[in-house]
Amino acid sequence: MTRTLSLLAEAQQLVGHNPFTLSDARSLEYLEEQAMGEEGLLIAELWEEALLVADDEARLYISGMM
């Protein structure tokens, strides 16, 4: 049986990318939108970490969201 990752686990993997790209940012945004309750709040907290390793294109995208 294959275990699927939680949305939070997927989001944490994305934020682990260095550099964090525009594609990663869009994926993280999608995961955040899909998450409910506490999981969504925890994913939202990952944006600051993502910003630290974001490339220029992702940084502009993230800055426009905040």
Image (cartoon, rainbow, N blue to C red):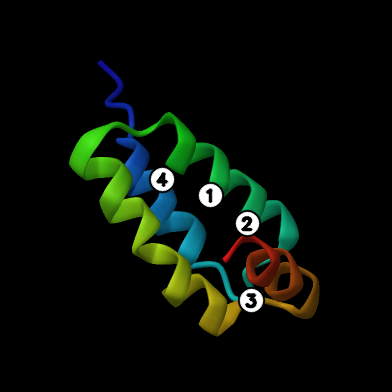
Cβ–Cβ under 8 Å for marks 1 and 2 = yes
Secondary structure beneath label 4: helix
Secondary structure beneath label 2: helix
| Residue 21 coordinates in the image, percent (x, y) | 70, 65
Mark 1 crowdedness (10 Å alpha carbons): few <14, some 14-19, many ≥20: many
Measuring 71% from the left and 52% from the top, which residue is drawn there?
Answer: 23
Cβ–Cβ under 8 Å for marks 4 and 2 = no
> Cα distance, mark 3 to mark 2?
9 Å
* Earlier residue among tags 3 and 2: 2
Classify residue 25 by image quadrant: bottom right
| Residue 56 coordinates in the image, percent (x, y) | 78, 79
* Earlier residue among tags 4 and 2: 4
Mark 4 crowdedness (10 Å alpha carbons): few <14, some 14-19, many ≥20: some
Query: Looking at the picture, which amino acid does disc 2 mark?
Result: Ala
Residue at label 3? 54
- Horizontal side, residue 39 vs residue 31: left or right: left
Residue at label 2? 25
Measuring 41% from the left and 45% from the top, which residue is drawn there?
Answer: 10
